[in-house]
Amino acid sequence: MMIKIVHEDKSPAKGLQQFFKQLLKLQEIDALFLPVRLKESNSIMPSLVTDPERIEDAVPFSPAFPINSARMVSRLSYKASKRKTAVVLRPCEMRAFIELVKLKQGSRQELILIGIDCPKALTSSDYAAYTKKDPLEDDAYIEAIFSQKIETLNGFQFSTACDTCENPFPVNTDISILLHGVDLSDGMIAESKSDDGRLLLESLKMPEAESPENRDETMMQIKEANSKANKIMMEDIGARTDSIVKLNTFFDQCINCYNCRNMCPVCYCKECVFNTDVFNHQPVQYLQWAEKKGVSSCPQIRCFIILPGWRI
C-alpha cells in the first residue's frame, strides 16, 4: 500500500512533520524516535517524542548525523516495555539495528521501523561550520538532495561513507518513505512493507498513491555512481594497506582513543578486550621491544577494531 504525504503549503518538511504528528496521535503508537532540532541550539539529535505538538521540531531529512541511532534503538527494545514505538532510521542505521537484533541486542517486537531514502550527511565538524555559513532551509535541502542537483553543500563535501554507500535506500522496514524518483511538488510517498505498516497507513486515511515511474531508474543511477566511488576507495585503501609496513603507516596517527569502537553501532560488549589486562604489559616488555628495535613507539598496540572502508 502507498499513500501520498502532502502539505497545503507544498512544503516537504511540513508534510513530513504532519505525517509523523498524525502517526503519533494514533492509539497504536506511544512514542516516535527520530531526529529533532534542539530549541536551544542548531543541533539535531535523535530524540524520543511523546507529545505530538513537539513534532514541529522534527528534522528527519538534514545533513546532520551526529551518531548512528541503532545502538539507542537497541536500548529502547532489548527488553519489553509494553509500549509501541515508531523509529525513523536512515538505511545504514536500519542495517546496523538489524545486525544488533541478530545478536540479541534488540527486538522488533514493540517497534515500527520507518525507513527513509538517505539524505546524505556532513561530518560533525563540517556540519557545525555549515550551520554558520548560510545553511539551506529544510525544504531547499530536501529539494537539492533528492533532485540530485548538488555534489557539495555550500562548499562542504558530503561524508565519504555517504558518497560510497551502495545501498542508500530503506530496507527491512514496516514503512518506507520514498523521495528518490518522486515528484516532490506533488508530495512524498509512504509505502507499507509489512502488515503492521499497512494497518497504520490505512488508519491515517490519507490519499493513496501509485508507484513512482522514475524510482527504479533513479535508484540504479545512484547505486552505479556510488558503487564506482566505492570501488575506487577500496582500491586506494587496499594499495595503502597491502603490507604490514603500509598498514602501520596507515594507522600512524592512531592514539588508541577508541572513538571508532565507541561510535560503531555493533560494538556492544560491556567489557572490551582492549580495556582488560591483555594489553597491560609488564614494564620489562616495553624495554625489550625498544632494545630489539632501537626505538619503539608508545602506545604499542594499534586499535584495529574497525578498518576504514568497512561498514554495515
Image (cartoon, rainbow, N blue to C red):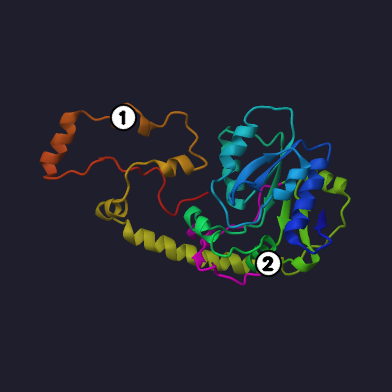
- Determine the residue located farthest toward the front in the rendered image: 40
Distance from the alpha carbon under mark 2 to that under mark 1: 52 Å
The answer to whether residue 91 is above or below residue 86 is below
Residue type at the position of mark 1: Val
Q: What's the residue at 70%, 34% (across, down)?
A: 109
- Looking at the rendered structure, the secondary structure element under dot 2 is helix
Lateral position of residue 207 relative to residue 94, left or right:
right
Q: Which residues are magenta?
A: 147-173
Q: Is residue 197 left or right of residue 119?
A: right
Task: Examine the image and state in which quarter residue 178 appears.
Answer: bottom right
Coordinates of residue 310 in the picture (x, y in percent): 46, 51
Q: Establish if 134 lies above or below 252.
A: below
Query: Which residue is under mark 2?
Result: 143
Residue 24 - label: none
Residue 8's spot in the image, x, y percent? 84, 61
In front: mark 2 or mark 1? 2
Quick one: label 2 or label 1, which is nearer the N terminus?
2
Q: Is label 2 in contact with label 1 (beta carbons under 8 Å)?
A: no
Kindly indicate the quadrant of the structure image that contains residue 105. top right
Q: Residue at (70%, 63%) from the top-left corner?
A: 139
Name the main secondary structure of what is drawn in magenta: loop
**SS for tag 1?**
helix
Mark 2 residue type: Glu
| Residue at image mark 1 | 278
Q: Residue at x 32, y 47 (%)?
A: 254
Residue shown at 27% from the left, 56% from the top: 246
Question: How packed is label 1: few (under 14 Cα within 10 Å), some, or many (20 or more)?
Answer: few
Quadrant assignment, res 304: top left
**Is-magenta flag for residue 162?**
yes
